[in-house]
Amino acid sequence: MIGPVINSACIVTGALVGTYFGDRMGEAFRKKLILVFGCINTGMGIFMIGKTQSLPPVVCALLVGSLIGELLRVEYAVTWLAHKAARLFSKVGTSSRAPLEFVQEQFSIFLVVFCASGLGFFGSMQEGISGDMSMLLIKSLLDLPTAMFIAANVGGVIGALAIPQFTIQAAVVLLAGFLSQYTTPSLISDFSGCGGFIMLATGLRTCGITQFPILSMLPSLFLIMPFSALWAHIFS
């Protein structure tokens, strides 16, 4: 549970720092740093894909999981919830220079970034299953300057996103901890590989290369272990 706590603290800290010192960060600097974020995500994705034990179940989980995500319109549902949440917080602690519609739009976008990212879900599941919180620590390092940038434009209200972020990540950690008793090293390797593909897609999307359906891909994280276990049972 340490990873979600650190992640929340970084979002709140970034929001506070950005509120008071964000004007000193130029637009060009922010854009360049976002590209660095994308590069980091891409590199992590490639690294995690290299841990894959069996590629076929990973590919099947990604295909079936993405299909389920699209049929359930996961991306639309999360975006709709984000807009609803934005209305609750956008009038509190916002920058006087920012129009209300802009605040709501930014709040919605970064509710998804902080609370429903592939790295957040994968990192939380990884901590719950193996106790390794390294991915959530990396996410925390990325979220800290991101919160600073956004707070510079919309105000400290962005720090409120730490509440749903912690709630979601803590729930995933607990669920994954319950499932950890049924895992094996090969299952964890394939889980890492599946998460690696999602992180690779996240990095390419962050860099603006193409708009991968990241949220629709998330159900694959819940399918990869059953698929991997079935594959090992059939071909063992």
Image (cartoon, rainbow, N blue to C red):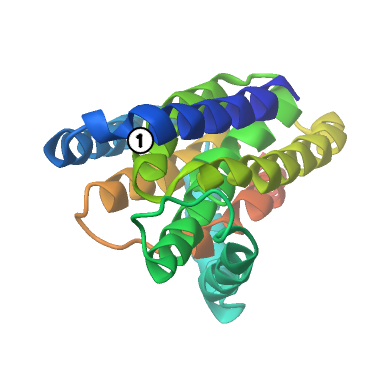
Image location of residue 230, percent across then percent down: 70, 50
Q: Name the element at disc 1.
A: helix
The image quadrant that residue 175 belongs to is: top right
The image quadrant that residue 42 belongs to is: top left
Name the residue: 33% across, 55% down.
97
The amino acid type, in three-letter code, at marker 1 is Asn
Name the residue: 64% across, 43% down.
165
Name the residue: 32% across, 43% down.
203
Q: Is residue 131 visible?
A: yes
- Is 205 positioned to the left or the right of 82 in the image? left
- Is 193 positioned to the left or the right of 150 in the image? right
The image quadrant that residue 235 belongs to is: top right
Q: Is residue 109 above or below residue 69?
A: above
Residue receiving disc 1: 41
Q: Nearer the viewer, residue 199 or 157?
A: 157
Q: Nearer the viewer, residue 22 or 150?
A: 22
Image location of residue 86, percent across then percent down: 57, 63
Q: Residue furthest front?
A: 96
Using a 10 Å C-alpha cutoff, classify the residue at mark 1 as few (fewer than 14 neighbours), some (14 to 19) or many (20 or more): many
Q: Residue furthest bottom?
A: 71
Name the residue: 57% across, 52% down.
116
Q: Is residue 196 above or below residue 213?
A: above
Image quarter where the N terminus lies is: top right
Q: Nearer the viewer, residue 99 or 2?
A: 99
